[in-house]
Image: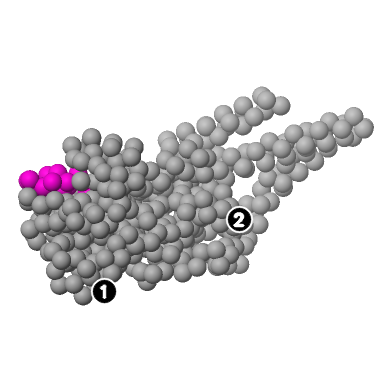
Amino acid sequence: MLVSDLRVIRWDFRMDDEKLENILKIEDDEINSKLSRNGIEKRVILRTCNRLELYYDVDVNVNMDDFQNAEFIRGEDAIRHILRVSAGLESMSVGENEILRQIKEALDIAMKRGRSNKFLSMIFTRAIKLGKEIREKTAISHGKVSIPSIMVEQMAMRGFVNGKKIGVIGTGKMAATIVKYLIKEPKAEITIFGRNDEAGMELAQLFGVSFRRNLDMNDIINQCDGIVTATSSKTPLIMRNVLENIKKRMLFIDISNPKNVEDYFTNDLIELINLEVANNIMNENRKRKESDIVVAENMIDTEMLKIYSKIAESEIEEYISTIYGRGREVLINEIDKCISAINNGHSMEASLEAMGNSIINKILAPQTLVLKRMVREKKTETIREFLNSSRNLIPDDSSHDHEDQIENQSQQDQNHRLFQTL
């Protein structure tokens, strides 16, 4: 694999809200169909409430109509990007922890469905490991860093938790995270609302709260002082005309993308905090953690070097394997030719000499051509480094250090084993 092999097609919260909403409405089946149609079979799909990223490692001409408004990243930038995402540097709230779980789940799904490969698994595994290390060695994840925890904090600051009736609309992972933070607040009466009986009852039992199979918004509004929406609904659940007619003080928290609550209403009794409003809170959070961000970025730089080294090591191993495989093919073919020549009356010495010359030419020709091309391209320093290293491998016991001798012995052993198999 080459470093430039990693590619990313991505959309996130930085783009136009309406365009992002339309992208996030696309189901995974359709995304997978588009990727396969474009010749991308090995891929990892990372999806969050405000992000959709498609990772792959093949050089194909992507049909831009299938991925409109996307940002395309490749090579070093793509590898650095997944490391930054894992570190929480690319999140709305810097240092949030939820993204680590989401990245791991994305990789797990790809592996279970046979859509990952050695290269993608290596990159994602190292990204997850680095994300954990950054959180251990910095304070980047200290305090309220996830969107749910920040939203619950905003509810408490406005007096909408203690002793209040809180309705959480949704039974998915984001709703569960909201409830997890809400139950830490004293005297909050929490009810989960949704259509999925099984998921709703499971969450209610897990957190010791109530569940009602109900999505009648007027009824829910009448029952609650504050409402949190956290669903994957593709259309708003609470419309503007409903909000305009509310006659009591209420707080709405909308952490869904697409939006579950229509905004731009004129009712002074109610307040709405959605992801747009939360963005200002996230920016303040980022400013407080500037020193931790610097440390995290330095750790990413270090990890980039390690990844380059790992990829280079894999490339060299693959190249050496190819050389030995080619050498074995050449040797077998030339031995057959030599035996045939001897059987046809040619002298053994002449046949062996011809075989030796042919083997040398066929095995060394590719490397010779590469060196000549490098000379033409004036890659002087690279050539000098190669020549200096190569001279040390010339069989001269007085000039070899211990490490070279071990390497040469290993190569001789491989050659010996190769001859034994013929």
- Count numbered badges in the picture: 2
Q: Is residue 313 above or below residue 72?
A: above
Residue 337 in magenta?
A: no
Where does label 2 land, which residue? 37
Q: How is the image coloured?
A: one colour
Amino acid beneath label 1: Tyr
Looking at the image, residue 324 sits to the left or right of residue 143; the answer is right
Of circles 2 and 1, which is in front?
1
Q: Residues within 10 Å of mark 2 (few under 14, many from 20)?
A: few
| Residue occupying image coordinates x 23% and y 50% | 168
Badge 2 amino acid: Arg
What residue occupies the far right of the structure in this picture?
345
Label 1 sits on residue: 264
Among the two numbered marks 2 and 1 on one chain, the one whose residue lies closer to the N terminus: 2
Going by the image, does 202 lie left or right of 110?
A: left
Tell me, yes or no, if residue 286 can be seen here.
no
The image quarter in which residue 346 lies = top right
Please name whichever residue, 147 or 262, is drawn nearer the observer in this view of the structure: 262
Residue drawn at point x = 47 percent, y = 43 percent: 110
Asked whether the viewer can see residue 327, the reply is yes
Residue 331 position in % (x across, y down):
72, 36
* Residue 317 locus on image (x, y percent): 52, 42
Disc 1 residue crowd, few under 14, some 14–19, many 20+, Cα 10 Å:
few
Q: Nearer the viewer, residue 40 or 221?
A: 221
Where the C terminus falls, by quadrant? top right
Q: Residue 189: within the magenta?
A: yes
Residues shaded magenta: 178-190
Q: Residue at x 67, y 28 (%)?
A: 419
Horizontal and vertical percent position of residue 408:
52, 36
- Badge 1 marks a residue whose secondary structure is loop
